Image (cartoon, rainbow, N blue to C red):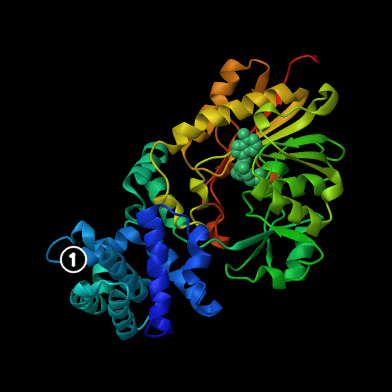
Amino acid sequence: MKDTATATRAAALDLLSAVLDHGRPLDDVFDAATRKLEPRDRAFARLLAATTLRRMGRLEKVIKTFLDRPLPRRAVGAKHILRLGAAQMLFLDTPPHAAVATSVDVARVRRLAPYAGLINAVLRKVADHGAARLAGFDDPLADLPRWLGQSWIAAYGAETAARLAEACGREAPLDLTPRDGDGGALAELVGGLALPGGSVRLPTATAVRELAGFTEGQWWVQDAAAALPVLLAGVPLKGARVVDFCAAPGGKTLQLAAAGAQVWAVDRSATRLARLRENLERTGLGDAVNVVEGDALTFTLTDGQQADVVLVDAPCTATGTFRRHPDAPWLKRPGDAAALAALQDSLLDAAVRLVRPGGVIVYCVCSLQPEEAAPRIEALLARSPEISRKPITAGEGGVSDEMITAEGDVRLFPFHLDAVGGLDGFFIARLVRGDAPR
Ligand SMILES: C[S@@+](CC[C@H](N)C(=O)[O-])C[C@H]1O[C@@H](n2cnc3c(N)ncnc32)[C@H](O)[C@@H]1O
C-alpha cells in the first residue's frame, strides 16, 4: 500500500463494497477491514464509508453529470471509488488534490488501474463543478433506496417523508439514561443536556468510557426514544413483576430494574444476552433480573404466575435507527416489514397469555414502517376482546402532542426534538388486559 492516506481510502472502499455488493452490515466487517490502520485513520475510513452511504443518491446524481455514459456493471469498484472521492470533496472538506490523488491510487492498489484515468478525469470535474451541481439536487429522499422512500410517501405524505429522509441522514447524538432517574444531576456530572424524559444528551463522538460515572454504572447508553417505552408503562414499577420479552442488549431491562421491578429478561440470542449480563454487572442491577435465554413465544413464569407488565420490544426492520446505521437502508428489502409482522403478532399473543387481568402490555418497534405499527395493534384488538388500548397522553415520559396519534399511540419521528439533535424513530402502544382474573 502506497501510504496511509491511500490505505485509509482503500479500507473505506472495502467497507462500502461489503455493504453494497455483499449485503454485510458495517459493524460486522469494520474490524477486519480496518485492522491495519491507526485509530484516527480507522475513524476516518468509517466516516467516509458512512457519509457516502448517507449521501448515495446525491453523489450518484452529481457523478452522472460528468460521465458520458453509465459505467458497466463490471466497473462497480470504480463506481464506489468515484462515490468515495466525491463524498470527500462535497461533504467532508477533503482538499480536492488529496481526494483525487488518493482515489487514483486506490484504483491502482485494488486492481482497477484500467479505470484510473476515468476516475482522475471525473473527480477533477467534481472538484471544479461538483458543489454547484450538488446545489441543484437537494432531494433527501434520493439518498434512500427508492422503495423505502415510496413506502414513507405512501404512509406519511411527501413532505413528511422528505423530512424523515433528511433527519435520517444526520448523525445521532449520544444519549445516556441515568440509573437513579435524575437526568438533571447526570447532565451536570457529564456536562450534557437533560431531555424532557430524563435522558441526557452529549455530542455524537463522545468517548463513552471516559465519561464520569461509567465505571460506577451510573448510566447506560440508550437513545432517548428507546427509553420511552418503559417510561410509558403508566403503572408503578416498584415491586411489579415485569417480563421483558425481547430484552437484549438490555437498555429497557436496566430501566425496569432501576425502577424497582422484578424482571424476567427473555431473549433467544446468547450473544446479545452476554452484553445484557455485562450491562447488569456494570450497573449493579443484576439482583432484580432473571436472565432467560429462550423463546419468548413459549416463555412461562413458574407456578403459572402472571405478569403485571409485559414489554414487547419486538424484532423489526429498525428503519427508525438509520441515523446510527447508515448501512441499514441498503440492507433492507421491500418485503421485510410484512415478513416480521407475523412474529410481532405471535409475540403480542404470547404477551396476552402471560399478563394478568388488569395488567399492561407495552408494544414498541424502532421502525418507521407502518405495517409494524398501528395495524399490529388493530389486528390484536380484533382477535383479543379482553385487550384494549390505554391511550398515552401528552406529558407522560415527556412526550408532546405532536408525538401522539389520534388512537393514543406514540409515533416518534427522527425529526422530533430536531432543535437538540432529533430522536430515533419509534412506535409505542400501551394496552391493558381487561377481563376478570382467571
Ligand atoms: C429490538 S431488539 C431488543 C432491544 C432491547 N429490548 C433493548 O432495549 O436493548 C429485539 C430482540 O429480540 C430478540 N428476539 C427475536 N425473536 C425472539 C423470540 N422469539 N424470543 C426471544 N427473543 C427474541 C432478538 O434476539 C433481539 O435481541
Going 38% across and 73% down the picture, which residue do you hit?
Answer: 10
Total labels drawn: 1
Secondary structure under the numbered disc 1 in the rendered image? loop
Q: Amino acid at mark 1?
A: Thr
Going 48% across and 53% down the picture, which residue do you hit?
Answer: 322
Q: Quadrant of residue 19?
A: bottom left
Q: Nearer the viewer, residue 25 or 2?
A: 2
**On the picture, is 257 further left or further right than 365?**
right
Going 47% across and 68% down the picture, which residue do you hit?
Answer: 33
Q: Is mark 1 within 8 Å of ligand 1?
A: no
Image coordinates for residue 235, horizontal then vertical, percent:
78, 35
**On the picture, is 316 further left or further right than 92?**
right
Image coordinates for residue 341, horizontal then vertical, percent:
51, 31
Q: Which residue is mark 1?
A: 65
> Where the C terminus falls, by quadrant?
top right
On screen, residue 207 above or below 277: below
